[in-house]
Image: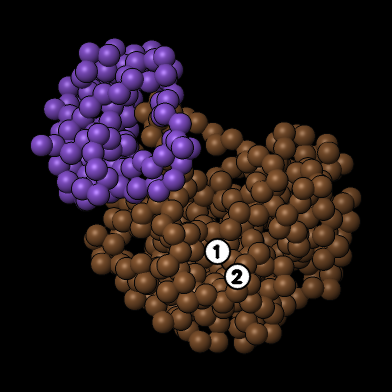
Amino acid sequence: MTIRGKAYIAGIYEHPTRYAPDKSIAQLHAEVAKGALQDAGLTKDDVDGYFCAGDAPGGVMAMVDYLGLRVRHLDSTDTGGCSYLIHLGHAAEAIAAGRCSVALITLAGKPRTGALPPRPVGAEGDFELAYGATTHNVYGMCAMRHMHDYGTTSEQLAWIKVAASHHAQYNEHAMLRDVVTVDDVLNSPLISDPLHRMDCCVVTDGGGALIVTTEEIARSLKKPLVRMIGAGEAIKGPRGGHKLDLTYSAGVWSAPPAFEMAGVTPKDIKYASIYDSFTITVLMQLEDLGFCEKGQGGKFVADGNLISGVGKLPFNTDGGGLCSNHPVNRGGMTKLLEAVRQLRGEAHPKVQVPNCDLALAHGTGGLLGIRHAASTCILERV
Amino acid sequence: MSNPVKYPAPQGNPETKAFWDAATEGKLLIKRCNGCGEAHYFPRALCPFCFSDQTVWEESAGEGEIYSYSLMRKSATGPYAIGYVTLKEGPSVLTNFVDCDFSVLKIGQKVKVVFKPSDGGPPLPFFTPAA
């Protein structure tokens, strides 16, 4: 059974807030769910499948009850920031198997005005927790080794932030709308070597939601038809510390099955949402997805190659996590939302890719330099 | 002002007790598999490569080189350097670099293990540049 073309994204919603001191986390989940249902033209009673991750207060049981859902399919796979990309693949499986017909996927939280959900600790805890791994320094280790092995430079990484800022200037909801230069990035303070402050994403309150459904239901609604034609997921860790290589990610395993299922290659992709927790995250993912050779990511991103209307691969045209939004430090949802906007032709006119009929959304979750997941989704306009 | 670092105490469990007992004596243990011959870290009862249960403790020389690192410029306890050390015996180990001028850190730098007290538990392995 293939899941190619079985799941249609009929509803999307990104909460406009980036700062929500007066809302609860569960409330934000409900608000994004309502927004996505309204976008689709469906109601809460149509939902028969629910997907959430570690950001959902109390987990899937508490959320289903809080939202007042009555569902026959559940999935609470939690792989950090890429959970929602994995959920889309799993929703396609459930829809193809007839386990549900209208799936709701939600993400929400408020790291700016509340606490982050705790990071789960496994058998590695005693051997790692004391060393103070944060996202900054663990992604910093990846960047340091990538520079060592391939000659990647801070200037090249900076181009990724520059491109994101060019897009964010048109997004009225973006947290950071100022266009920045390579020098601005290099002159921002070092947070964890070699990453500067502007190599890091924003921290925002907020959330987003997706409605995934069958072809029949999607065709009965009013939105342009967008469907998933390829999905892949994978996990990579130090695996006993054997042949450690921090210069590639689990994307090298999540991408090939997604492209194979879709029957397309990276050259065919007209728009790419690439998880941008840090600039290095984007550079490594571009290589791992096959947009360029391993080690050539620095050259690929330089000179505006990721800027819509300027370069060859328009990316994160909403401003991405680097400039617009990174709710709950989990960027996978917003990657899907902007990919769907591009395919619908609903992106801002200044960044809309002409005739965008094939897009990729890709994310990682967890800690890139330690253990992390990756998910690749390929979407097309029908 | 930075607060002094208090490293969380390892909780230990039956699978890893020998590691922490050895750490108390200043020894760094790794596990090696008698099934496939590969060494690994952190220690498991079953080999993560071949899934054999014939894994045995082995004392590491505690020497290796920096695979990668990153210097965290600010924290509640001041700057600190995280990184991976690739041990002579093969496995790479997540750690912090201590007792040194951080400006000497570089990929390939030779380092050796030092143990530091944890907050009420057995000592933890750290690394410092080898003389």
Q: Which chain is purple?
A: B
The residue at the far front in this view is B1
Residue B126 appears left or right of A380: left
Q: Which chain is brown?
A: A
Residue B131, quarter of the rendered image? top left
Residue, x 55% and y 37% (percent of image)?
Answer: A119
2 and 1 marks on the same chain: yes
In the rendered structure, which amino acid carries the disc numbered 2? Gly
Vertical comparison of A172 with B4: above or below: below
Q: Nearer the viewer, residue A37 or A16?
A: A16
* Residue pictured at 27% horizontal, 35% vertical: B98
Contact between labelled residues 1 and 2, with CB atoms less than 8 Å apart: yes
Residue A55 left/right relative to A46: left
Q: Position of residue B128 (x, y in %)?
A: 21, 35
Query: Are there few (<14), some (14-19), or many (20+) residues within 10 Å of tag 1?
Result: many
Q: Residue furthest left?
A: B131
Q: Is residue A284 left or right of residue A337?
A: left
For the N terminus of chain A, which image quadrant? bottom right
The amino acid marked with disc number 1 is: Leu
Q: Which residue is mark 2?
A: A319
Judged from the image, the secondary structure of the residue bearing numbered disc 1 is helix
Query: Which circle marks residue A322 in the picture?
Result: 1
Kindly identify which chain the residue marked by label 2 belongs to: A
- Here the colouring is by chain
How many circles with numbers are drawn on the protein? 2
Q: Answer whether residue A111 is visible to the viewer in this image.
A: yes
Residue at 65% over, 85% down: A350
Q: Is residue A213 visible?
A: no
Q: Position of residue A12 (x, y in %)?
A: 74, 63
